[in-house]
Amino acid sequence: MTTTASPARPAPVVDPARWPDVARVPHVPLRAALAGRLLHRAAARRGLRVELPDGRTLRPAPADAPVLRLHRPGDFLHRIGAGGLIGFGESYQAGDWDSPDLVALLTELATAPETLVPAGTQWLRRLHVRRPPTAELPTAANAPRNIHRHYDLSNDLFALFLDPTMTYSSAVFPVGPGPVPLVTRDALPAAQHRKIDRLLDLARVGPGTRLLEIGTGWGELAVRAAARGARVVSLTLSEEQLLLARRRIADAGQAGRAEVRLCDYRAAEGAYDAVVSVEMIEAVGRPFWPEYFATLDRVLAPGGRVALQAITMPHDRMLATSRTYTWILKYVFPGGRIPSLRAVEETAAHATRLRVVRADAFGPHYAETLRLWRERFTERSAQVADLGFDEVFRRTWEFYLAYSEAGFRSGYLDVHQVLLAREGVGP
């Protein structure tokens, strides 16, 4: 079957000093041949439309099928043969392939990913699966460097695609159960406030509440908690976030009620009526989950409550990938690890007096949040370039945002708001 060839997107200029593994194309003929066979199989089983540079398709596919448009098939297959899913991401960074609807393609691939490889050949993962580097394990010594690599990129960068609340976590939209309909960009600030207020309500934050926030972001939760009359101490390891959060808190007139400290969660001091932490547990790392929950228990005053927002994944998938080095860890969130809800429950039960009292899931809301961020990031690519970020960086973040959105649309990922308390403290 033939089609009209689509114009190839020019390959980005890759700085080998900044992007060594994107600049280098591995040469692994046997593995590349195997990757080619797996590509044929995935195209057939998932109904993908794989378009070749000359306009032909790899195999017949419906016109509305998700599209994988190959610009340099050889480089693409050698990268996947050498690096598996990391190589798949690096091939996008390098411009070896594109898709007119990246989210649709990645959503299809993220649905039941274990079926992409034939039964009986799972052992092939050992050819390219790596363990996370020791230098990226989120110890007290390494954590500031990990955080710096993502959150200290540039406050101006994040301001380009986040809404005016500067909230970098899932919003909660005003919809009922079931799929979340497409929402407009102007709905995002109110949806972010709805998420924050829901967490503060779970923790029963009000006048006089002593509140500890672990993971400041850019200060919006601290501002809203202080406006309720709470006394807020917020901890961050990001120097960029620290400076802007302090300024935003002062501009909101809440400097007397909210204090931001450059401090690791392990060094938290004091006693608090409530602890809130929004999508920070993902940076803690599985070996350190017991210490994280022990810290929550240690600083929580009698009768206190903990409200967490956490990205989660199914428990079996978490176990299968818990020691695997992934593209996201390599290029976006070094040291991170997504828990399952069961892991949260079991770790809290084994390491602390805290118990999960309530857990509410809203993964479809995150998919919509990410769509709005992704569209805004893409629209403002010229402004991202003006900030000094090269095209490989922009393709990296396009892929990261689309990859994450696909995770939530496929059900591979979820997000929960979780209330924890000691025995005798009700919901």
Image: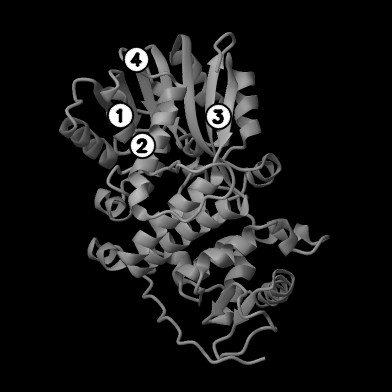
The residue under label 4 is 210
Task: Give the x, y percent position of residue 96.
Answer: 50, 76
Q: Please state which amino acid type lies under the numbered disc 4.
A: Arg
Q: Which residue is mark 3?
A: 289
Tell me which numbered mark, 3 or 4, is placed earlier along the sequence.
Answer: 4
Q: First in sequence: mark 1 or mark 3?
A: 1
Dot in front, 1 or 3: 1
Instruction: Give x and y (percent) for residue 82.
Output: 61, 67
Amino acid type of disc 1? Arg
Badge 3 element: helix
Number of numbered markers:
4
Element under label 2? helix
Q: Mark 1 touching mark 2, by CB under 8 A?
A: yes
Q: Amino acid at mark 2?
A: His
Q: Can the viewer see residue 316 in this picture?
A: yes
Q: Which mark is residue 224?
A: 1
